[in-house]
Amino acid sequence: MTTVRYGIAEWYGHELTALPASERQRFAESAQRREQRPCPFTTGDCTKPGGVCSIRPYIAHGDRIAASVGPNVITCPNRFEQHQMLLGWLAEIVGFGSGAMMAREVPFMVGPAGAAAGMIDLVVAAEDHGLRWYGLEIQAVYFSGKGMDPEFAALAVDGSEDAPFPLGHRRPDWRSSSAKRLMPQLQVKVPTLRRWGSKIAVAVDLPFYDSIGGPSPSPSDDLDSGDVIWLVAEARDGQLLRRHWEVLTLELTCDKLLAAAPVTRSEFEDTLRSKLTPLPIGDPHD
């Protein structure tokens, strides 16, 4: 049986498998020390501890990576900012011309003490016939399983030119990224923006969108047909590429984000039996 494990795809903006061993060692030492390194996709420093921009599934040849068997899964929101492609794409979709502007982290909610309690990540705007604007929320993907510290430690001492196969088992946590994280944000923000006569766009990567069902059977590009503009990008060969966009209502968006079906009882119990271990019960008089 072929073993598939998710490991580092892009690291401080570089493809892991294209890095020479000496560069991997330097990156690993920086990651272990949590050093500040410039982010190649923004104007500041990397804000992701360890510098992992994306992960991807690999198969092994011995203890080395033989090949990738899937696309990059973006784990850092800054990865979406390459060349401001998403803002330009959104401005194009909503019909803003050369005078389009942008803003970051605009306060959207305030707490009881008057402090900002919620932000819209990015806003694209134009002042042609009054101020028109659209929000943009970026959602990277969390992963579950082993953290990256053991990978950094191994890479720091690995001198082979071929990248080592990932040590730990991990996987993208689509559920936490969609239903638990993104959906509550949209449920709070979309109704207010709808009352204000505006909309919000959501940027995710292609694997994320595929995990929630992919494009609609008949995707709509009519801005009046919904509340949420989905922008689907792909990190590939060092670039951030446009892949798909469509407009959905908040209700259909939530249906996509909640899309999951329970396993059968027999499947659940087969898995349960494989995981059961004796319950350690101590002496009640101890």
Image (spheres, grey):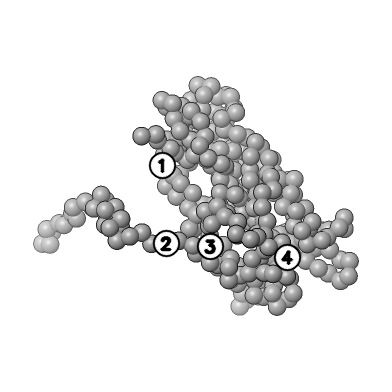
Q: In the rendering, which numbered label is found on residue 169?
A: 1
**Mark sitting earlier along the chain (4/2):** 4
Task: Give the distance between the C-alpha atoms of the residues marked 1 and 3, in whole angstroms.
Answer: 25 Å
Count of numbered circles on the image:
4
Residue position for label 3: 257
Q: Is residue 40 left or right of 127 when viewed as pictured?
A: left
Residue found at x 78% / y 62%? 94
Q: In the rendering, which numbered label is found on residue 261?
A: 2
Residue 142 placement (x, y as % from top left) = 51, 52
Q: Which residue occupies the foreground of this view, 95 or 103? A: 95
Three-letter amino acid code at the position of disc 3? Leu
Question: Mark 1, mark 2: which one is toward the viewer?
Answer: 2
Residue found at x 67% / y 69%? 226
**Mark sitting earlier along the chain (4/1):** 1
Question: Mark 4, mark 1: which one is toward the viewer?
Answer: 4
Q: Badge 4: how crowded within 10 Å, few (<14), some, or many (20+)?
A: few
Three-letter amino acid code at the position of disc 1? His
Three-letter amino acid code at the position of disc 4? Asp
Q: Which residue occupies the foreground of this view, 163 or 89? A: 89
Question: Is there a contact, CB below 8 Å, between mark 1 and mark 3?
Answer: no
Residue position for label 4: 222
**Mark sitting earlier along the chain (3/4):** 4
127, above or below 30, in the image: below
